[in-house]
Image (cartoon, helix red, strand yellow):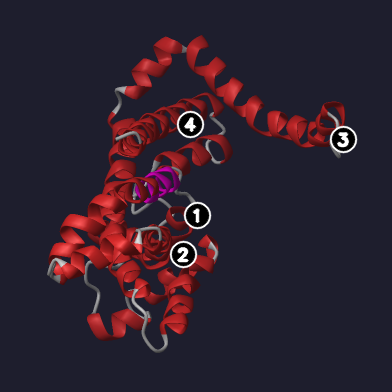
Amino acid sequence: MRSALYSFKDLIILILPALIFSLAYYLYPISMTIYSVFSNMNEFLEFLNTPLMKSYIVHNLYITGVAVVLEFAFGLMLALIMAERFRGSKFFMVLVVLPWAVPDLLLAKTWRWLLMPKYGVYSQFLGPILLNPNEFTGAVWAIILADFWKCSSFIALILYGGLLGIPQDVIDAAKIDGASGWSMFRWIKIPLLKPTIMVAILFRVIQLMGIFATVYFLTWGGPGNSTQVLSTAAYNYFFKFYDPIRGYFVAFVNVILGLAISLYFIFKIRGYLTR
């Protein structure tokens, strides 16, 4: 019998540098966050009940919820189009993928320029309406629009993979039975796509709960604190206000919220897969 190429000891030696780096990179900030919260529990509970902290949570959840709904609806439409074979479909897929390749910093700076009240390209046609990132009413929607433009393609790609995984014989059987396009979409594709849908939403929720660059470079958390989310607030406490304790408090809440939402979707996915 042919011996294994690497022994267990060799594998340990190969992965040890990466393991040590990962532990140092992730374990230290996580342990410091937990230690800071539990060693200052009374102060943490007081800060958690302040209007400022509640506003961070509400802004984060609002941006996450609205963006996920809009991106899922548009991403599903793009995925259905990509799944159809037509002339130019490959070029269409390239156009769908392109926004996802744009770095967050470039995305935020570009959209800030586009939405500039007097000189922005959109403002020349639309006027200073709700999408002005310098106004209280439009700043949140400017963030959502920028994220929607980039990340709808991410959901589209995941759902496109799920559509390709639907057995062709199921589709053919439905066509033979006379199922219309809507019936096939409602009663066949959507039920079979549910695990994939949950995975796509899970990834986007995790990403949006930690959204930073788009918010920070598009609105700087303003005007005032109207678009301040948990990640930007933690950054400000650490590096602008030099208040690391409150920075750890905000980071802890961000981790707990993200973990709770992620566990919910993970259990939902597991339930769909075990049926």
Lower sequence index among marks 1 and 4 = 1
Residue 134 placement: quadrant: bottom left
Looking at the picture, which amino acid does disc 2 mark? Ala
User: Are the two marked residues, 1 and 2, in contact with CB atoms closer than 8 angstroms?
Assistant: yes
Looking at the picture, which amino acid does disc 4 mark? Ala
Q: CA distance from mark 2 to mark 3?
A: 54 Å
Look at mark 2 in the image and give the residue it sits on: 108
Lower sequence index among marks 3 and 1 = 3
Q: CA distance from mark 4 to mark 3?
A: 48 Å
The answer to whether one can see residue 32 in this image is yes
Looking at the picture, which amino acid does disc 1 mark? Ala
Classify the position of the N terminus by image quarter: top right
User: Which numbered disc, 2 or 3, marks the residue closer to the eye?
Assistant: 3
Q: Is residue 199 above or below residue 95?
A: above
Q: Residue at x 12, y 69 (%)?
A: 178
Lower sequence index among marks 1 and 2 = 2
Lower sequence index among marks 4 and 3 = 3
| Residue 3 image label | 3
| Residue 213 image label | 1
Lower sequence index among marks 2 and 4 = 2
Q: Is 207 inside the magenta-drawn segment? A: yes
Q: Residue at x 87, y 32 (%)?
A: 10
Helix, strand or loop for disc 4: helix
User: Are the two marked residues, 1 and 4, in contact with CB atoms closer than 8 angstroms?
Assistant: no
| Residue 150 image label | none
Helix, strand or loop for disc 3: loop
Look at mark 4 in the image and give the residue it sits on: 251
